[in-house]
Image: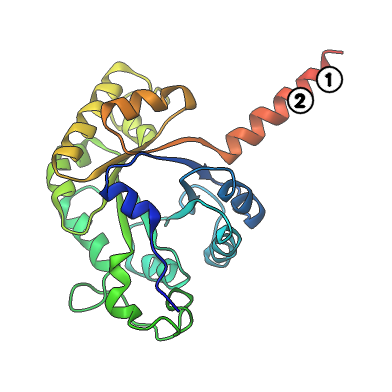
Amino acid sequence: MELPGNAFKHALRHGRRQIGIWSSLAHPVAAEILAGAGFDWVLLDTEHAPNELPMVQAELHAMAGGSATPIVRPAWNDLVLVKRYLDVGAQTLLLPYVQSAAEARRAVASTRYPPRGVRGYAGASRASGYGRIGGYHRRAEDEICVLVQAETRAALADLDAIAAVEGIDGVFIGPGDLSADMGHLGDTRHPEVWEAIEDAARRIRAAGKAPGILVGEGDAERCFAMGYLFVAVGSDVGILTRGADALAAKFRQR
């Protein structure tokens, strides 16, 4: 049994833009639908969604037949959470609220086995094909993609050092929390926020890493033009809400 490749990680390494979508519905059917829709990646959220480990494992199973790479966002940059999501087969993680290079190094260490890190050893996890993937523990990090989320002024102040950390594949800018921390709560399109977003992309690219962001559909091309490489252009909750509201409104007007 072969170690699965990480198409998303290798696309970022070669500078190919990756279009994604957020999944907060916390259900394998939703994940399966999104995985086959044509996106490059689907973010399975556990930070701001009622998603837990067994549910995420079911979502990963459901996505196996699709073309999109699953990305799991743990609720926190936590060694135990990282270990558990890696063991059930996640290969790409987005770690929230990383404020410094030291925290970025801890994020990377959580995904590496000793002596390069502190990931706990499991002999027959789903990630290793239940023990069928030869040499998994020596080769796993080759296909693990580590993304960290910079979403405060403090994180932006240390952004160059965060992006320079070995083992970080990409840095994701969180416009919602960033705008709040900048004094513009709820106004992610404030000019000061956009100035920070553009500056962040430049600095992340200068460090040789991939910048990412979640924006509305109308701002995606603007972000790609700034140099962002992986951009989420919507969410399953947003699609369902807008679609349901529009359909109901159509018939209420009759």
Which element carries disc 1, helix, strand or loop? helix
Q: Is the residue under label 2 in contact with that under label 1 (CB below 8 Å)?
A: yes
Viewer-side residue, 5 vs 45: 5
Which element carries disc 2, helix, strand or loop? helix
Please, what is the three-letter code of the amino acid marked with disc 1?
Phe
Determine which quarter of the picture holds residue 221: top left
Disc number placed over residue 251 in the picture, else none: 1
As displayed, is residue 75 above or below residue 83? above
Expressed as whole percent of the image width and height from the top left, the position of residue 77 reads 33, 58
Question: How many numbered marks have been drawn onto this rendered protein structure?
Answer: 2
Image quadrant occupied by the C terminus = top right
Residue at (32% x, 41% y) in the render: 16
Is 247 on the left or on the right of 242, as rendered? Answer: right
Residue at (22% x, 33% y) in the render: 200
Expressed as whole percent of the image width and height from the top left, the position of residue 116 reads 18, 73
Image quadrant occupied by the N terminus = bottom left
Please, what is the three-letter code of the amino acid marked with disc 2?
Leu
Determine which quarter of the picture holds residue 7: bottom left
As displayed, is residue 111 above or below residue 211? below
Using the numbered discs, state the Cα–Cα distance from disc 1 to disc 2 in whole angstroms: 7 Å
Viewer-side residue, 1 vs 222: 1
Look at the image and tell me whether residue 21 can be seen: yes
Is 233 on the left or on the right of 14, as rendered? Answer: right
Determine which quarter of the picture holds residue 183: top left
Is 50 on the left or on the right of 127, as rendered? Answer: right
Residue at (32% x, 82% y) in the render: 135
Tell me the colour scheme of the image. rainbow
Decide: few, some or many residues near mark 2? Use Cα within 10 Å; few <14, some 14-19, many ≥20: few
Which residue has dot 2 on it?
247
State the residue lying farthest toward the right: 254
Expressed as whole percent of the image width and height from the top left, the position of residue 22 reads 50, 43
